[in-house]
Amino acid sequence: MRPATSRFVGAFRLVGSLRRIRRPAALLVLVLVLLPAGAGRASAPSRVRPRLVLFLVIDQGRADYLDRFRPVLTGGLGRLLDEGVRFTEAYHDHGIPTTAPGHATLVSGRFPSHHGIIGNEWIDAEDGEEVEAAEDAADGVSPRRLRATTLGDWMKEADGRSLVFAASSKDRAAAMLGGRRADGAFWFDEDGGRWVTSTYYPERAAAFLAEEPERWRVDRYFGRLWEPVDEPSEQALPGVAPIDLGVLTQPFPHAFGDPTAAPDEEFYEDFGDSPFVDEVVEEMAEALVARFGLGADEAPDLLALSFSGVDVVGHLYGPDSPEVVDTLVRVDRLIGRLLAFLDEEVGLDRVVVSLSADHGVLPVPEVARARGDEAGRMAGSALACPQLLGRHLSELHGEDRWLRDGPFFVDGALARHGLARETVEAEADEYLTACPGVRHAWTRSELLAPGAAGSGSEARLFVHAFDPERSPDLLLELEPGWVAWTDDVTTHYSSDAEDRHVPWLVRLPTGVAATVEGAVVTADIAPTLAELLGIPIPPDLDGTSRLAWMVPPAPVGAASD
């Protein structure tokens, strides 16, 4: 039930017709008008401490979706656009954007170079074995590979009563969002067709799932077709068209799994690659709020959710497909449902909502070329070229194992041939840059050079993506529009704006609506929310708080609670 004692009528008002904030100085025209219920004139300025932070991530949620698809976004996304502060120039400031690094950056305020999550998986430099970002030999899944604290950790450090929960269909997303001290993180297990947690988290997490085990199985979706939620004519947006796969093109409706009599592993895997998986994330969110009383007291809680449907659908059908539009419309409605639920249970005047994305996605190269854009695909000879780098080095310096499991130099080979690392790296860069689709091969020596990440530096994005203990010795920068090696119609791997430009919407408890056009990075999100909560911000972050860009400073002596 909404707490009656903390209800206010009113909001941040924009003087005159100003709707667009072009620089921080423009915030001087914002005034805070908080009217107690029933009052006829403005009271003294006041700040009410939020009780709940709703931290939302749309996996593969490109920033331009909010504008391109705005006519059909009438639910939660539409509400956040109408009632929130929108940062139009928010970018991930690291190259090679993927799910685990993106989520870790959003919630930690640090780049992959500092939080250590350089990919969804990477090759361990010591034993040459592949490891996954959330893999844990002891507990199965955990955030132990994350070398940074997160917003949830800071909240619990500031107030031990604060609760932190995270959920996503992907284990790596849930584990990163929850941070080190989460009270629970939950994800979808495609092997068993149910939602699970791990022994890393307190026993209350597993006990929560055990209370209603059938509720967290997805068998009820067996036999259900994926059909558009609206008539196709209502989603006939400019530039949106079904992906043409020739004779393999399969328009709506889509089915999942094989023609079996009961749900099996194939069905569960297909369900995980469908928009329906987000419905259970929203269901999980409501259940967590109700079961653990999130937002019920003065200690602020964190509920972090990642909606993965757009990502899996985007990979399969591309960002210009009716399937992606339909999936985003579904997420829009799910967020709308969740906001309405929180308004009843907590009161949106005590909730801060932040929404962003872990990365974007490139256009399908064939679609981009048909529009006249430069684009390509790392396949065929373009893919074979980098594979022959080891042979090229052997031809130059003698037969040896120059690379290990991809573009990774073996120090032993360098020593055996008496060669300096910088020499061989330069030769590898020259060879790879001549390969189709490769713009540059950033080397360890380049990325560790003093000043490499300086302002305006071309290397900056890859310096921020590079961890000297975990990263390979070469990071490939592809030509603009080129899609990395993948079996899907498109993916995200490049340093292009389409991969890094993401939304950032913040709905303050007062429901202010404004637009901020200044450039920000996604590492700014966590410290901004921390300052909004009034909790200490770690001094070693890559991001900085942008609260002053949204909210004018409170006058000395302003009331707070």
Image (tube, grey):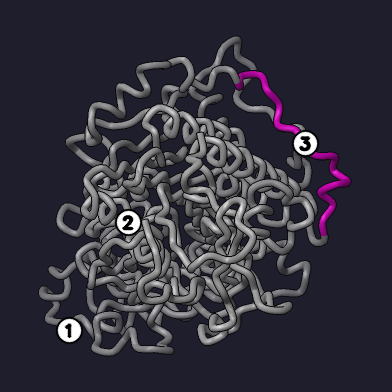
Q: Quadrant of the C terminus?
A: bottom left
Q: Is residue 105 visible?
A: no
**Tag 3 residue:** 252
Could you give the CA–CA distance between mark 1 and mark 3, rounded to whole angstroms? 57 Å
The quadrant holding residue 188 is top left
**Tag 1 residue:** 420
Residue at the spot x=73%, y=77% of the render? 17
Amino acid type of the residue that numbered disc 3 sits on in the rendered structure: Phe
The quadrant holding residue 407 is bottom left
Q: Of the residues tagged 2 and 1, which is closer to the observer?
A: 2
**Tag 2 residue:** 151
Mark 2 in CB contact with mark 3 (< 8 angstroms):
no
Q: Position of residue 411 (x, y in %)?
A: 15, 70
Of 113 and 551, nearer the camera is: 551
Q: Is residue 352 magenta?
A: no
Q: Is residue 165 visible?
A: yes
> Considering the numbered disc 2 on the image, is that residue within a helix, a strand or a loop?
helix
Mark 1 in CB contact with mark 3 (< 8 angstroms):
no
Q: Is residue 223 magenta?
A: yes
